[in-house]
Image (tube, rainbow, N blue to C red):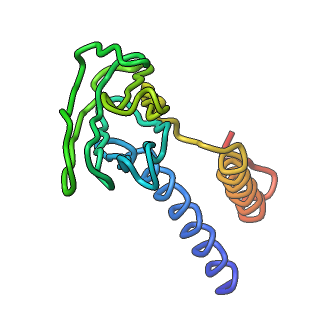
Amino acid sequence: MHFMKSIKNVFGIIGLSIVTMLFAQTTSTHGASVTVLVGSGGLRFVPATANIPVNDSVIWSWAGSFHSSTSGTPPGTPNGLWDSGVNNLPHSFTNTFTTAGNFPYFCSIHFGSGMVGNIIVTNPAVPRVWHCPQCARLVESRRQRVRRQRQHRQRRVFPGRNLAG
């Protein structure tokens, strides 16, 4: 009997751990930032494409001198959403994206050499209780086992009577 209680406790702890991890994953994706290195290893942005959810920020951090982060469509057509201006080391520039969309940008000095980048901003997914079918099956199968065990105990204690139904 003691062994069965221990197993139940272990399953309860595992289930609670899974739910806690899933909740932590859904709540920690907002308010973060992505860093893009400007001029790292030459005339480029690293990474050239960054994916973030709405309301997150991109921090451009200068790894080389005489560069900019200018929003717009290459070659060299600014759209006015942001412009860091031309800067040298050490420098950083931050922009927070409040709407979903595709935001191309370039270095206003080196766009002709291919120094371009892109920020892809997506709406955050609606948090779901279950992120994977296996988790839902695990919890549901545990519920079914508990239900069967209760019914079995009731039949054993009161033969011929099912108190659950």
Residue 79 versus residue 7 in the image, above or below: above
Is residue 49 found left or right of 156 in the rendered image?
left
Residue drawn 44% across the image and 35% down it: 115
Quarter of the image where the C terminus is located: top right
Residue 115 versus residue 112 in the image, above or below: below
Residue drawn 35% across the image and 49% down it: 35
**Residue 149: which quarter of the image?**
bottom right
Residue 148 versus residue 96 in the image, above or below: below
The location of residue 48, given as percent across then percent down, is 49, 39
The location of residue 116, given as percent across then percent down, is 44, 31
The location of residue 1, given as percent across then percent down, is 69, 83
Is residue 162 found left or right of 129 in the rendered image?
right
Is residue 91 found left or right of 97 in the rendered image?
left
Seen from the viewer's position, the closer of residues 154 and 60 is 60
**Residue 109: which quarter of the image?**
top left
Seen from the viewer's position, the closer of residues 115 and 151 is 115
Seen from the viewer's position, the closer of residues 146 and 34 is 34
Residue drawn 46% across the image and 55% down it: 41
Residue drawn 35% across the image and 46% down it: 38
Across the whole image, how many numbered discs are drawn on residues?
A: 0
Q: Which residue appears farthest toward the right when viewing the image? A: 160
Seen from the viewer's position, the closer of residues 162 and 28 is 28
The location of residue 121, given as percent across then percent down, is 42, 27
